Amino acid sequence: MALPNVDPDFRMSLAEHLTELRTRLVRCTLAVLVLGAISLIFAKPIFGLLMRPVLEALPPENRALIYTSGIEELNVLMKVGVYCGIFLTTPVILFQIWGFVSPGLYPEERRYASPFVVFGSLAFLIGVSFCYFVVLPSMFKFLLNEEEAVALEARLDTARLRNEDALRFLRVGDAERAGQLAKEASASLRAQGDGSTKEPEVVPSESVELAARLEGLGRLLDAAADGFGVPSRLVVRQAVEKRVAAVEAYGRGEFTAAAAAMDEAASLLAGVAPTRAEELAGVWKLEKELAAGNARHEALRWTRPMLSMNEQLSLVLLLMLAFGVIFELPLVMALLGVVGVVRSKWLFKYQRHAFVVCLIAAAIITPTGDVVNLSLMAGPMLLCYELGVLAVWMIERRRARNEATTSITPAA
């Protein structure tokens, strides 16, 4: 007895099915090899494009990937070519899948070959794009950056720029403007709410802070000497002597004495311009705050990422392939519904179980533990499952309507 949805002209034995499967697998493999070989020509720029979310998440001075063997870079480029071949072969693979299952479909269902290939390729492309533009940037920023360090670095950058301008005004003798900028920089450096509202748990090194403070005092002395002319040279010289004493104390490890000597050197600058003592004190206060901020930032960033080309490429390709497959889920479920492997009633019945499976799969695939990236993985997965259930239900309704029409027509 023939199956109701199988055309007698398309009936095949098991051996013929296996031969057909082998033929279509060979075609897919050849397509991957040909397109992969072509992709090898552009492997390096493609690799750079794939690694852009990784590099942009790294600090500006450390935006580079390393390779740990002489052939790793070559292996990475070959892997790029192979995976590009797989991605570009998606329409061919979908067409071969449809060709393999089409003998078991109704004649009117076989005309969906073109929509299956087009929408399947489009769904895969959307999934890969969603991963590249939405998931990867947020994921690598979470993985490669400490939240407190990033917030502190943003405030430090703003304060450094204002401090440079304050010193420039001091060099031209405008101490009032320099003091105003110093107050603004101090306020921005102490401001919270840029991503972190708590003090860092890591204690900064006192020696690092004092070294930065010595550099800041040197900049302040140079600016005062340039800005207030010859009459200030004697006072600046005395302040420089105090700085030399601070350096000597720092070298001996006497950090308290070094800090006191630096404060004395800064207070001597009040003799350069007695009417501008408050502004000069404000600039020195900013230098000390910048030194403390830099030391705190270094304490937070005591680990440094050194990322391997091969490992990062594998991670990026795995996630892109995973999202491409996830966005294919409605199409695969629709195909299984057309063949008769799944039913909408069964899918609705175990819907809650499917949600749990999707969340577990998202937690396994997602390399980060934060809720945002887990949601970016689980959300599309659940949505694609619901779309697949809806597609199967619509296919069953259409098939039931067609069968009812076919059974009524002879009677008429």
Image (cartoon, rainbow, N blue to C red):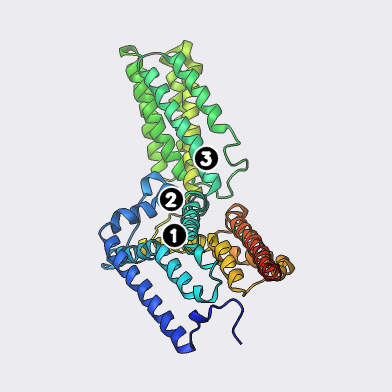
Q: Residues within 10 Å of mark 3 (few under 14, many from 20)?
A: many
Q: Provide the secondary structure element on which disc 2 rests.
A: helix
Q: Is residue 400 left or right of residue 253?
A: right
Q: Position of residue 296 (x, y in %)?
A: 51, 43
Q: Amino acid at mark 2?
A: Pro
Callouts 1 and 2 close, C-beta under 8 Å: yes
Quadrant including the N terminus:
bottom right
Where, by quadrant of the figure, is residue 229 drawn?
A: top left
Location of residue 230 in the rendering, given as x and y in whole percent from the top left corner: 30, 13
Return the mark for residue 316.
1
* View extreme (front): residue: 412
- The structure residue drawn at horizontal position 69% and vertical position 71%, both measured from the top left corner, is 407
Q: Residue at x 45, y 37 (%)?
A: 258
Which residue is denoted by mark 3 in the rendering? 152
What residue does disc 2 label?
53
405 left or right of 280? right
Name the mark nearer the viewer: 3 or 2.
Answer: 2
Q: Position of residue 23 (x, y in %)?
A: 38, 79
Q: Nearer the viewer, mark 1 or mark 3?
A: 1
Question: Which of 246/338 is in front?
Answer: 338
- Distance, label 1 to label 3, CA atoms, is 29 Å
Could you tell whether 312 is left or right of 403 in the image?
left
**Disc 1 or 3, which lies upstream in sequence?**
3
Q: Secondary structure at mark 1?
A: helix
